[in-house]
Image (cartoon, grey):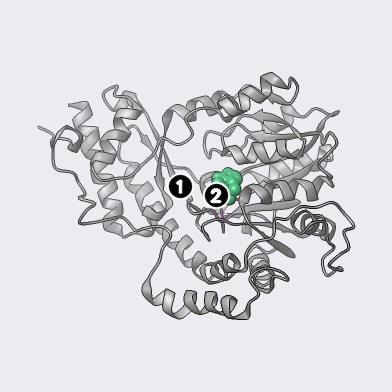
Amino acid sequence: MPDKLAVEGGTPVRDTSKNPWVAWPHTDEEEWQTKVEPALREVYLSRTEGLPGPKSTAFGQRFAEYCGTEYAICMPHGTDAISAAITGALDLDGFGDSGEIIVPNYTFIATASAALDRRCSIAFVDIDPDNFTVDPRAIEEAIDPDRTRAILPVHLLGHPANMGEIMRIADKHGLKVIEDCAQAHGAEYEGRKVGSLGHVGAFSFQSSKNLTSGEGGAVTTDDRDIHDRVHAFMNVGRRPGGARWEYPRLGWNYRPSEYLAALLIVRLEVLETQTLRRNQNADYLTEALTEIEGIIPPRKNPWATKHAYHLYPMKYQQEHFGGRSRDEFTAALRAEGIPCTSGYGAPLSQEAGLSYIAQKYPGLIRVLPCPHVEKVCQESVWLYQNMMLGSRKDMDDIVEAISKIHKAFNA
Ligand SMILES: Cc1ncc(COP(=O)(O)O)c(C=O)c1O
C-alpha cells in the first residue's frame, strides 16, 4: 500500500509550519545591521533621496560591470525598462506608428504590453519546448519585411534564449534585438551574461525576482546612442550630464528612488553566490527527478553555460501518473508541503486584456501558430527560485513528495 497522500488526510512529507522553505526576499539581522541599514541611513542623512541620483548612478555602474556592458540605467520597474529599451533601440518618440516587434507567446504580460505602450504592433510566436524560450525558426517565419523592426526574446524562467541564432536572424533582416532579462539575472549564453547579447536589455527587480528591491528595473546596453535615448526616456528628456532645464528629447519621469538603488547595491553583492547555490540544487534535483517516469525536469541547452533558475520548470505527463490531471498533481504536491504553480495557464495572446485589444484594433496583434506554447501551458509545473536556495534535504523532500504521489496515483 502506498503512503496516504496529505491531500487525502495523510501526513505530509514536509510540515512547513516546523520546517519552512527559505523565505524571499532573503533577509537577516546581521546583513541589516552591517550593510542595509548603513546604506539606507546614508541616503537619509545625505538628504539626496532623488536627483541627481548618486546611488542610482553607482548601482548602474556596478550592474553594467556585472552584466559586461558599457552602461546600465536604473529604473523604477521592469515594465518601464522594456518600454525605455524599445524606445532607445528603435529611436521612438512614442507618438507615431512604431512598427512591429516579434514576441514569444509564452511570457509575462509586460513583455507585450510595454511594446504596445510604445505604439508597436506585436507578432506572437511559438517557443522551443525544450527551454521555453522563443523559437528562432518561428521568428524567421513571422518576419514581415514591411513592418517588423525588432525581436524581443525573453530569457524565461532563468534559461537564456538562443541568442546566437536570434542575432543572426536580426543581422540578416536589419532588426534590433531587445532582451527581456526580467527572469534571468546572471544567466549566461556561451559565457556571456544576458543583457549584453542583444542591442539592449531590460531587467526587473520586482519582489519575486532573483535580484530585488521590491520594485525596480534596469536597462543595459553597449550603445551610446541607445543609452542616451533611454536616459532621456527616464529623465524627462534630459541629456546625460546636460542642463537641468534643457530637454533635447521628449521624455518622462521614470527616475528611481535612491533608497531602491542603495538596497540593490547591497543585494547585487550576493547575487552570484545565490545563483551558484540555485544551480547546484537544481542540478541535484534534476538528476534525482530523472528517475521518476512522467516528470521531465528542465533541460539546459548547450549554449546555456549558466542558468539563473528564476523558476524550476518541470513537465508533468499525466499518462504516467494514472491519468490524473496536472491540477490534481499540483494540489497533491502543495498538500505534501511543496509549494508549486502550474505557471502561465494559456498562451499570452489569449489573455482577456490582449484579445480585447486585438479585436478592437485589427492589425495590432498577429498570432502565429503556437502548438508548443499550448502544450507547455498544459504540462508545466514550476517550483520557485527561493526553494533552490535551500539545502540538499529540501531537494530530497521535493523528490520524496513527487515519488509518493507517483506511487499513489498509479496504485
Ligand atoms: C518576463 C517579464 N518581463 C517583464 C516583467 C515586468 O517587470 P516589473 O514587474 O518589474 O514591471 C516581468 C515581471 O514582473 C517578467 O517576468
Q: Which residue is farthest left?
A: 1
Give the residue drawn at x 56%, y 25%. Answer: 352
Kindly report the distance in space between the C-alpha atoms of the residues bearing marks 1 and 2: 8 Å
Corner quadrant of residue 355: top right
Give the number of the disc on residue 344. Answer: none
| Residue 354 image position (x, y, % from top left) | 62, 28
Q: Amino acid at mark 1?
A: Leu
| Residue 276 image position (x, y, % from top left) | 46, 62
Q: Amino acid at mark 2?
A: Gln
- Residue at image mark 1: 311
Residue 133 at least partly seen: yes
Give the residue drawn at x 33%, y 25%. Answer: 325
Magenta-tinted stretch: 182-186
| Residue 217 image position (x, y, % from top left) | 62, 56
Horizontally, is 206 left or right of 30 in the view?
right
Horizontally, is 205 left or right of 365 in the view?
left
- Residue at image mark 2: 183
Disc 2 crowd, CA 10 A, few/some/many (<14, 14-19, 20+) = many
The answer to whether mark 2 is within 8 Å of ligand 1 is: yes
Is residue 93 shown above or below 26?
Answer: above
Mark found first going from the N terminus, 1 or 2: 2
Say if mark 1 contacts mark 2, CB within 8 Å.
yes
Q: Is residue 103 rendered magenta in the image?
A: no
Q: Principal SS element in the magenta part? A: loop
Residue 160 at least partly seen: no
SS for callout 1: strand
